[in-house]
Image (tube, rainbow, N blue to C red):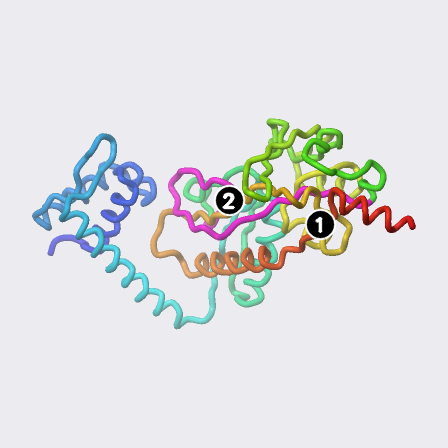
Amino acid sequence: MGMDLLAAMRIYVRVVERETMSGAARDLGMGQPAVSERIEKLERFLGATLLLRTGRALKCTEAGRIFYERSQGLLASAAEAAEAVWATGQEIGGTLRIAAAHCYGEKVVVPTLIAARNEHPGLLMDLILNDAAVDPAVEGVDLSIRLGSAGDGRYLAYPLGEVDHVLVATPEYLDRYGPVLNRQDLARHPFIRVKDAFQNKALPMMDAAGESRPAAIRTAVTTTHWRAMFDIILGAGGIGVVQQPACAAELASGRLVRLLSDHRMRSLPVTALTPPQRPLPRKTRAIIGMLREAIELRRGAAPRGEATGQSWVQTSMSATR
C-alpha cells in the first residue's frame, strides 16, 4: 500500500478539526511542511481532493467530509482496541510529571495523587506547583492542570469540570466591622487578594438571574501566595475571594461565612493539558479520570456556608438577646 493509512487518517482528522495545517502541526508535534506533504500523499493515494482553502481556513470537499467521518470512526475503534489491551494490566507504573497552580494543586490535585498512589504504588509522582501557565509540550510535563481559558498551544485539552470561587469573611470580622448587605458595601471593607487577581478593582459578580453585576473593591493587602491571603482572612483582617475547595472545611465549620449569597462569582473551567500524543499513556488517562471524578464530587458536596446581609444581622442580634 506504500503508506501508513491509520497515521495519515490521524493527521487528516486533526487538520480538519483545526482548519489549518499549522494548527494541526503544533498539536501533533510535527513541522507544517511534513503535515502538508502527508495530506498531499493521502490525496494522491485516494485519488481525490479532500481539502479546499477558503480564505485562511481549510474546508472539506464532499469526498473529504466522507473520509473525515469514516476516519473518526476507525480511529475511535483503534483507540478502543488499545484500551482493551491496556485494561488487562492491573498495575500502573512509571513517573508522572504533573503541573498545577498552588491553591488548586494543594487542595484538589494532591488528594487525588494520594488516592492514585494508594491504588497504584508503582506510580511515581513529580508534582510542580506553579501559578504560571505551563505548556506541557514546552515544559516537558505529562499533565498540566489549568484554570480559566485553556489558551492555544502544542497540547491537547481535556475538560475536567469547573471550580467555584466564594466571597468570604469570618464571623469575628463581621461582628467587628459590620455586615455586607449589598455590592456597594464591599468598597468600604478591606479586600485581601492574590497579586494579579482583580486588578481592575472590581469583582466580576453575577446576580441570581445570571446578569453581570461588577462590584467595586478596595484592596488592602496583596500577596503572591493564596495561603497568606487565606490566613489574613481567617485572622479577621478583611474579606476576600477564595476557591471553594480551599475554604470548604471552614465554611462547613462556621469559621468562614459566605457573603452576598444572592450573588455568585463566575466559575472557572478546569482543563487537563497533555502533550500532543495519541493515545494517551495509561497513567495519564487514569489521573485525568480521577481528577474529573474528584471535581464532580467536590462541586456536588460544596457547603453553602451562607450568613450574609440581613440574615447575618438577624443571627448576630439573636445571639445577643
Q: Is residue 12 magenta?
A: no
Closest to the camera, between mark 2 and mark 1, is: 1
Residue 286 place in picture, x, y as percent: 47, 61
> Would residue 255 appear left or right of 99 to someone viewing this image?
right
Q: How many residues crowd mark 2 within 10 Å: few (<14), some (14–19), many (20+)?
A: many
Three-letter code, disc 2 = Arg
Q: How many residues crowd mark 1 within 10 Å: few (<14), some (14–19), many (20+)?
A: some
| Residue at image coords 29%, 45% | 17
| Residue at image coords 54%, 58% | 296
> Would residue 316 appear left or right of 223 to someone viewing this image?
right
Q: Nearer the viewer, residue 212 or 265?
A: 212
Residue 25 place in picture, x, y as percent: 29, 40
**Relative vertical location of residue 202 with respect to residue 105 in this rendering, above or below:** above
> Would residue 205 appear left or right of 84 to someone viewing this image?
right
| Residue at image coords 35%, 69% | 84
Q: Which residues are magenta?
A: 142-171
- Secondary element type, mark 1: loop
User: Image quadrant of residue 210?
Assistant: top right
Magenta segment's dominant SS is: strand
Three-letter code, disc 1 = Glu
Give the residue at mark 2.
146
The Cα–Cα distance between marks 2 and 1, rounded to whole angstroms, is 28 Å
Give the residue at mark 1.
306
